[in-house]
């Protein structure tokens, strides 16, 4: 695949986004960046959220991780469906009833300003690292496929990607993103289908049919009932539920688009529809991963292994595509990476800008000229933070999706615990002590995690459960 063709794809895709941005940002106000004027069609938001929910991490890490954990991620998907039901029927009515722009404003009304700032700060910490790691994976793929051939260093590649996102979102933010993400979701779904078809065409099934070959493969196992395993059924389902509630329901970047819908009933339709879309897409990614490992085995490819585990699973899909699946496979995969990168990053940047502006700079109570200055400088600051984090983690190895969920277990756990106390109890807190409890909970979780590993019990993603429970117990101690 020539550098000129890949450059044409990038520029053509970017021009298309700019055209949509120009259309969507007509009559946009400063506040349109944050709330989309609350006029977004629910079905458009639901479809567009596929791109934000998948990201390049799902595109690469879910198939790649099949080699180490078979199809056990499907258990996590089952738990996530229950999480979406909780979001639709418990969280959304609360957020719409209070007409929130930043969902962390709920904590201000329920507990006080210190708790409010604590929740927003934990979101910003987790989202900054999560968004940066997702961008890191995308840029590594783009670097390998294109920018290395153009002799551009990673620091320049990251800067170019962030600049492109800024150009089509800086004016009207979430109002534009609702439309551009719908386009990007379409491309992602198309890429997923094309990738599966392409891989199937390259696999020799010995005349038995692809379904028989797939189901007979040793990786074709959906459930793990080994109690000591980190992918045990109960651990994965519970973690899927809690992580979905935390990373979607309590995540400004995911909920911000939902809150641009005009009413709670349509917003509920959006979340329920999105839950079906994303669960189906992630299951297809798992099956794609099995197909990729089948092909690699047939070709006799020596994938790097250490301690019985593949050490670079995130490189499987891009590596095979760029070397073995022809021009159509490369073009489809390349478009998928670009679409998933933009779809996930634009929402994260808009959410971080919203949270910092509303939760720490009192954006809603400032005059229009001050609002414009706040939005501009906060947006630049958010991009700078993401840029620095990506470069700091550039040489990291292993599965990015596992690392993101592990980080989320420590950073979103306190946020989840605080919201559960607020929603399901009448407890009032000594507001000034909440930050200390929110910091103490993940530290205790880390100690418990190491102790359980020493005993031979891997808690997996259940750290978020332990963290949330410890947070609730610590908050009980400082109740009024």
Image (spheres, rainbow, N blue to C red):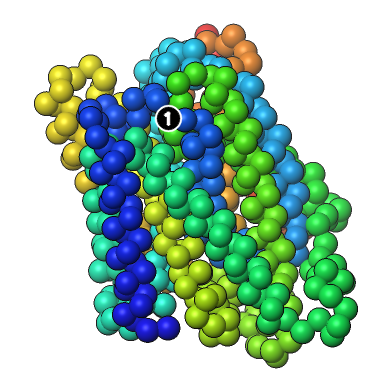
Q: Secondary structure at mark 1?
A: loop
Above or below, comparing residue 251 to residue 213 in the picture? above
> Between residues 210 and 229, which one lies in front from this camera angle?
210
From the viewer's perspective, tell me whether residue 427 is left or right of residue 5. right
Position of 398 compared to 331: left or right? right
Residue 125 drawn at (x, y percent): 41, 42
Q: The N terminus appears in which quarter of the rendering?
A: bottom left
Between 464 and 312, the one lying in front of the other is 312
Residue at image position (49%, 18%) is 263
Pointer 1 local density, CA inside 10 Å: few below 14, some 14–19, many at least 20: many
Would residue 427 be found to the left or right of residue 380 on screen? right
Number of numbered discs on residues = 1
Q: Is residue 448 visible?
A: no
Q: Is residue 139 above or below residue 345?
A: below
Quadrant of residue 297 in the image? bottom right
Residue 143 place in picture, x, y as percent = 37, 74
Furthest-left residue in view?
369
Q: Circle 1 sits on which residue?
A: 40
- Report the residue at 62% width, 82% height from top: 304
Q: Residue furthest bottom?
A: 300
Q: Is residue 182 visible from the viewing direction of this image?
A: yes
**Residue occupying image coordinates x 44% and y 58%:** 339
In the image, taking residue 196 as reference, residue 232 lies left or right, namely right
Specify the quadrant of the image occupied by residue 355.
Answer: top left
Question: Residue shown at 65%/60% (left/top)?
Answer: 285
Return the x and y of residue 471 as percentages of the image width and height: 58, 29
Give residue 55's position: percent from left, percent from top: 50, 54
The quadrant holding residue 479 is top right
């Amino acid at each position: 695949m020539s550098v000129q063709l890949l450059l044409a794809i990038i520029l053509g895709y970017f021009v298309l986004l700019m055209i949509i941005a120009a259309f969507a940002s007509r009559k946009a106000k400063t506040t349109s960046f944050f709330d989309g004027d609350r006029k977004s069609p629910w079905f458009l938001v639901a479809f567009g959220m596929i791109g934000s929910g998948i990201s390049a991490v799902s595109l690469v890490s879910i198939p790649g991780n099949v080699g180490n954990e078979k199809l056990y991620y499907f258990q996590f998907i089952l738990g996530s469906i229950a999480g979406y039901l909780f979001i639709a029927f418990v969280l959304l009515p609360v957020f719409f009833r209070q007409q929130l722009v930043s969902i962390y404003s709920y904590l201000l009304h329920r507990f006080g300003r210190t708790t409010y700032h604590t929740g927003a700060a934990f979101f910003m910490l987790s989202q900054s690292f999560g968004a940066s790691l997702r961008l890191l994976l995308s840029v590594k793929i783009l670097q390998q496929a294109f920018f290395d051939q153009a002799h551009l260093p990673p620091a320049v590649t990251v800067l170019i990607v962030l600049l492109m996102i800024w150009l089509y979102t800086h004016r009207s933010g979430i109002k534009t993103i609702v439309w551009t993400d719908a386009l990007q979701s379409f491309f992602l779904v198309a890429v997923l289908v094309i990738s599966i078809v392409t891989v199937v065409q390259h696999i020799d099934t010995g005349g038995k049919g692809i379904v028989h070959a797939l189901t007979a493969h040793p990786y074709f196992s959906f459930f793990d009932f080994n109690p000591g395993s980190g992918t045990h059924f109960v651990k994965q389902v519970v973690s899927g539920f809690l992580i979905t509630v935390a990373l979607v329901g309590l995540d400004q970047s995911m909920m911000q688009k939902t809150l641009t819908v005009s009413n709670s009933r349509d917003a509920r339709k959006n979340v329920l529809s999105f839950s079906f879309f994303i669960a189906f897409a992630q299951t297809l990614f798992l099956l794609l991963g099995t197909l990729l490992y089948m092909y690699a085995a047939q070709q006799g490819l020596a994938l790097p292994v250490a301690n019985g585990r593949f050490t670079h699973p995130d490189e499987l899909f891009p590596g095979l595509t760029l070397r073995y699946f022809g021009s159509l496979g490369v073009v489809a995969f390349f478009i998928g990476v670009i679409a998933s990168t933009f779809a996930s990053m634009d929402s994260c940047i808009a959410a971080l800008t919203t949270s910092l502006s509303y939760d720490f700079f009192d954006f809603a109570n400032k005059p229009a000229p001050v609002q414009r200055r706040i939005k501009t400088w906060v947006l630049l600051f958010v991009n700078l933070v993401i840029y620095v984090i990506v470069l700091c983690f550039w040489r990291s190895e292993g599965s990015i999706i596992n690392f993101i969920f592990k980080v989320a277990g420590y950073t979103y756990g306190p946020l989840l615990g605080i919201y559960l106390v607020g929603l399901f109890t009448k407890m009032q807190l000594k507001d000034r002590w909440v930050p200390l409890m929110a910091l103490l909970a993940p530290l205790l979780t880390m100690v418990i995690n190491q102790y359980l590993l020493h005993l031979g019990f891997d808690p997996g993603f259940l750290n978020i459960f332990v963290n949330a429970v410890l947070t609730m117990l610590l908050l009980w101690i400082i109740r009024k």
